[in-house]
Amino acid sequence: MSSLFSNSISLRKELKISDEEFVQLRDFIYQQCGIYIAENRKYLVENRLSNRLKELNLKNFGEYYYFLRYDANKRVELNRLFEVVTTNETSFYRNPPQLQVFQEHVLKTTLNDLRSKGQKRLRIWSAGCSTGEEPYTLAIILHEVLKTELASWDIKITANDLSEAVLASARRGVYSDYALRTTPKEITDRYFIKEGTQFKVDPKLKQLVNFGQINLSDRAGLKRVERSHIVFCRNVIIYFDDEMKKQVIGSFYDNLLQGGYLLIGHSESLHNITRAFKPEHHTGAIIYRKLE
């Protein structure tokens, strides 16, 4: 009994991260994906990566760093690293006031502008789509707004995330009732197929969404994304430092077509990041428009 207790204490000691190891991993994570982890969140790195060390049978965080740098399986492990350092807390119809502004102002204005030009081609980018609730919500809103007219439109929602695991979940499109906790019941009834305790996304929503992995620190990768009329990037730039925020927001600006809209999280702001967008204040939300 005392021997087992002693071994568990030893294991816990081995999984404590030193200041040097923290700096190595923090800088590596930043270089790989632009996520910046402040000194006061050192405990998060320690807690979230401990299971990875155990699974790989590594003695300390220094060994894990070298595994990420040089092991033959480093690409696979890099995806696991991305999964554990990002938070994927989301739901359908998250932040209803902002979505109402999207539906009643952003989407209405964009659709009318396109119709006035004789165009029926709409592109929306969900950058940081997590397990798919956001892009599927946008697909639902498009169905609600366009109704039978939707069939005559060429619509594509590009949905990207850093984690392959959450993208696999998004492609499956199967959710618990917790993911639908902020969704109006009539919407759930109309666009989901209940299978036991799970809710399956209607295939007609999947037809509008194209999922793929993207790293927002990869400028070349961002340039390959099709030009958009609307970009959603909610609760993502909070993970970045100011330099990375400027780089990512600059990429969104370049991606957006003239007159396009950018929507970010309600706790996020472009203040001190860029003045390239014109902020528009609405009840419950601030949206940003590209006018140049």
Image (spheres, rainbow, N blue to C red):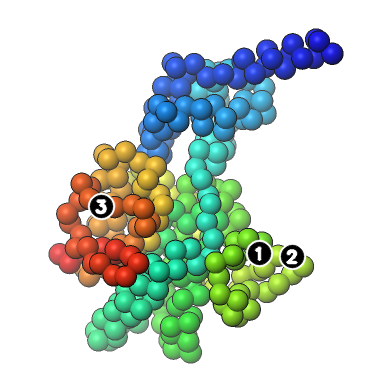
Residue positioned 44% across, 53% down in the render: 128
> Regarding mark 3 in the picture, which secondary structure is present there?
loop
Read off the residue under disc 3: 270
Indicate the amino acid at tag 3. Answer: Leu
Which residue is denoted by mark 2 in the rendering? Answer: 197
Residue kind at label 2, given as amino acid type: Thr
| Label 1: element kind | helix
**Image-based side of 244 in relation to 180, left or right:** left
Q: Is residue 169 visible?
A: yes
Residue 188 image position (x, y, % from top left): 61, 75
Query: Marks 2 and 3: in contact by CB < 8 Å?
Result: no
Q: Which residue is at the far right?
A: 1
| Residue at numbered disc 1 | 177
* Within-10-Å neighbours for mark 1: few <14, some 14–19, many 20+: some
State which tag comes first along the sequence, 3 or 2.
2
For numbered disc 2, what is the local secondary structure?
Answer: loop
Instruction: Please state, as top left, top right, bottom left or bottom right, where the N terminus lies in the image.
Output: top right
Q: Measured along the vertical axis of the image, is residue 275 above or below residue 200?
A: above
Image height of 75 relative to 88, above or below: above
Q: Identify the residue shown where x is 42% and y is 60%.
A: 126
Q: Viewed as shown, does residue 168 lie left or right of 270?
A: right
Total numbered labels placed on residues in the image: 3
How far apart are labels 3 and 2 at the CA level? 40 Å
Q: Position of residue 257 (x, y in %)?
A: 25, 67
Q: Quadrant of residue 57?
A: top right
Q: Are marks 1 and 2 in contact (CB under 8 Å)?
A: yes
Q: Nearer the viewer, residue 185 or 202?
A: 185
